[in-house]
Amino acid sequence: MHRPLLLALVIVLPGYLACHQPHQNPQGQTLAAREAQLGFNAPFDAMANNAIASDMSIADVHFIPHTDQLSSAGILRLDRLARWLESHAGIVRYETTLDDAKLLEARLASVQSFLADVGCDMNTIKVLAMLPGGEGLAATDAISIMREGTINDFKKKTTTPAAPAPRTGG
């Protein structure tokens, strides 16, 4: 009874395996490369590039832990940042909580070396350990702006806010 089934498997299975090939991308492209070719990610690239250029920063996550070697995330970030730095120059800010001065200096040197290797003019670029996005506001200015906004909002409210809608529980 099992003999016809076994015979069918012996004949059909090798033919199926010989003819069947797994699905392959005909161009051999990665998904990211294919999406880039189709233009799906262009708006997101512009958004990410603007964000990177806004704070001009890297952090500990952009390095392999306990080393001065850039991680893949660090390489991608600096590669994007380098395109902007080629035409605008500026300060690359490394935000870190490292206590090890030697490792800190080695990481700063790794960033400088990477940027120089990709063609950035290091005479117009600085790499410093500091908070991202620059110095920001002085505390007194930030407090006065906060208070001014709060006071203006309070003055605009002449009545108490309406009670929230009751919940239906459903």
Image (tube, rainbow, N blue to C red):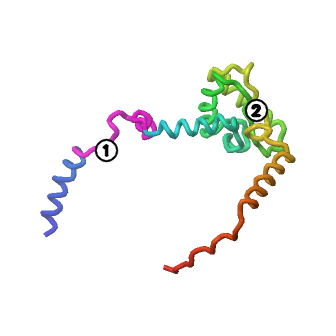
Residue furthest out toward the bottom: 169
Q: Are marks 2 and 1 in contact (CB under 8 Å)?
A: no
Q: Outermost residue, front direction?
A: 158
Q: What is the distance, in whole Å, between disc 2 and disc 1 at their CAs?
A: 45 Å
Task: From the viewer's perspective, tell me whether residue 128 is left or right of residue 6.
Answer: right
Identify which residue is drawn at 21% across, 53% down: 13
Image quadrant in which you'd find residue 86: top right
Seen from the viewer's position, the closer of residues 57 and 154 is 154
Residue 18 x %, y % = 23, 44
Is disc 2 placed on a helix, strand or loop? helix
Is residue 27 found inside the magenta-colored segment of the image? yes
Residue 19, position in %: x, y? 22, 44
Specify whether residue 30 is painted magenta.
yes
Residue 1 sits in which quadrant? bottom left
Q: Is residue 113 left or right of residue 151?
A: left
Q: Which residue is mark 2?
A: 108
Q: At label 2, which amino acid type do we have? A: Leu
The label number, if any, that marks residue 23 in the structure image: 1
Q: How many marks?
A: 2
Label 1 amino acid? His
